Amino acid sequence: MSASDKKKLRAAERAEKLTEKQLAEQKEAKKLKILTTVFVVALALMLCFAIVITAVKTVENSGIRERNTVALTLDDRQINNAELNYFFIDGLNTFLNENSTIIPYLGLDATKPLDEQILDEATGMTWADDFMTGAVENAKAAYALADAAAEAGFVLTEEDKTNIEATIANIELSAMVNYGYPDLKTYLKAMYGNGADEESFRAYRELNYLAESYQVKYAEDLTYEDADLREAEADNYDAYSSYTYNYYYLNVNSLIEGEDTSNPTNEQYADAVALAEEYAKSLTEGITTVEEFDAAVAALPMNTEVENAASNASKDVSYGAVNAVIADWVTDSARKAGDITYIPGISTSTDEAGNETSKITGYYAVLFGGCNENNFSLPNVRHILVAFEGGTLDENGYKIYSDTEKNTAKLAAEKLLNTWKNGDATEESFATLANENSDDSDGTDGGLYTNIVPGQMVANFNDWCFDDSRKVGDTDIVETEYGYHVMYFCGESERTYRDLMIENELKVAAVNAWFEELLSGVTATVVDPKYVSTDLVLSTN
């Protein structure tokens, strides 16, 4: 018998000598061990499940999914969901700001998710689809311009970077002060979703700043010879002129007579059309001046009890801004001051069968005042703004200032002007004074504004610049809604307003063509934008 066999035998003999109690204890121990093992396994599974839940929540809130899921490709460049969401939300906000007063009339319900609202019944396109298209196009444009900038060696300056940092700092300050967010990070996540963070937001801002800056630089670098301007002008000379005229509109609906004017018969409407034409014709008979025209308007039967009834005055209106109904007559090169006429306003509608129906909706009586060919030189000025301080908000939310607050600013402006007069009293010394004292952030280059166009500045500022008596070296103090401006007239530019308009039009056409060519070279493919905020609800009210 081997040693191992002897060992097994002794173990068997010991086992035979176990008492019933010991056997029972051993059985319970085994049972406990089994239960313990099951419990440990169950506990481990529970812990594992809890860890998984926590991990999922952590992933959801971390933005990992948004930053690691490709939403869009622009050729070989991958755009993740977090970045595309910047373009989506900013595009949406721009739309809301531009259309804030008419949102209800556009069919957009602020209380429903964007991806559940149909914008185009024919195609099934939702509002979210439309904003997504805009986001893709904006991303495509930003990167196309940024790539063109890189190819041209155009980079952001240190001043540009400082401006970007200042903008981000202002966003953070506004978020904390006005909306109660603890920091920028929290605000960005609330605004742009979990994928947003300071690093990617800064990169997004820099991208757009670079794209916009390069597009402006490209336009600024375009130059045209006088021959180019004259050639462009020859095709449509009148398009660069401005027009002065007075008009009065006679609305047919307001002249309908009878018990039910809201749903007139054909006969009632025809009578109103005839009456409108009669009144319009009466406004043109023997009239050549604005005073005569206004007197005739005031004498119309419907205006006899209307205080200060008069025609509408339009002064130096640009070609494109003239009312379309009367534009052909007003902009006719044969037109001369004192010409007068009346013109019908016609509405055209098309029924389901494609049949067009036209009807006269009113008449315009028009008195021509003159044509300005805009062949005048543009003024250059320097100014020092002394802004009003303090102020209170009126019922409409506009800040108003007391006489005391205004007088404080005026005295400061007068002191600055006297300081200049008592010094060298040169344009250079004025520029130095402006750099040291002006509250106008847009005029820090010695307070200089060149090639000022009509209407560019607020009324009083504009009127001072374009005063026919203005001469080099003139100074004055001008009040505007922003404060008091200490003015210095530098003289007139060699460029005329007309030439500037022609040049700007040529630049717009050239930049648009260049931009379209840039975009045509980029292929955008939407991949998986599932984390973009297409289900956003604008309002919970």
Image (spheres, grey):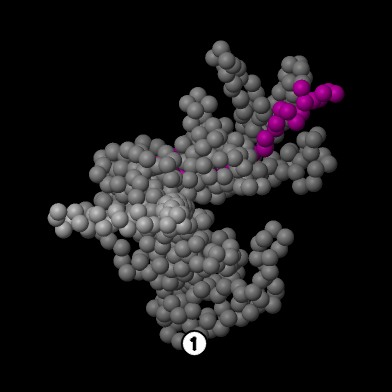
Q: Secondary structure at mark 1?
A: loop
Image x and y of residue 187, in percent:
51, 61
For this rendering, which residue is in front, 245 or 402? Answer: 402
522 to the left or right of 18 = left
Residue position marked by numbered label 1 in the rendering: 422
Image x and y of residue 496, in percent:
40, 54
Residue at 66% in and 76% down: 405
Q: Amino acid at mark 1?
A: Asn
Image x and y of residue 398, in percent:
66, 62
For this rendering, which residue is in front, 382 or 540? Answer: 540
- Give the magenta-colored segment's residue range: 237-263
Residue at 47% in and 26% down: 123
Residue at 71% in and 23% down: 273
Residue lying furthest left: 2
Q: Is residue 126 covered in magenta?
A: no
293 to the left or right of 167 = right
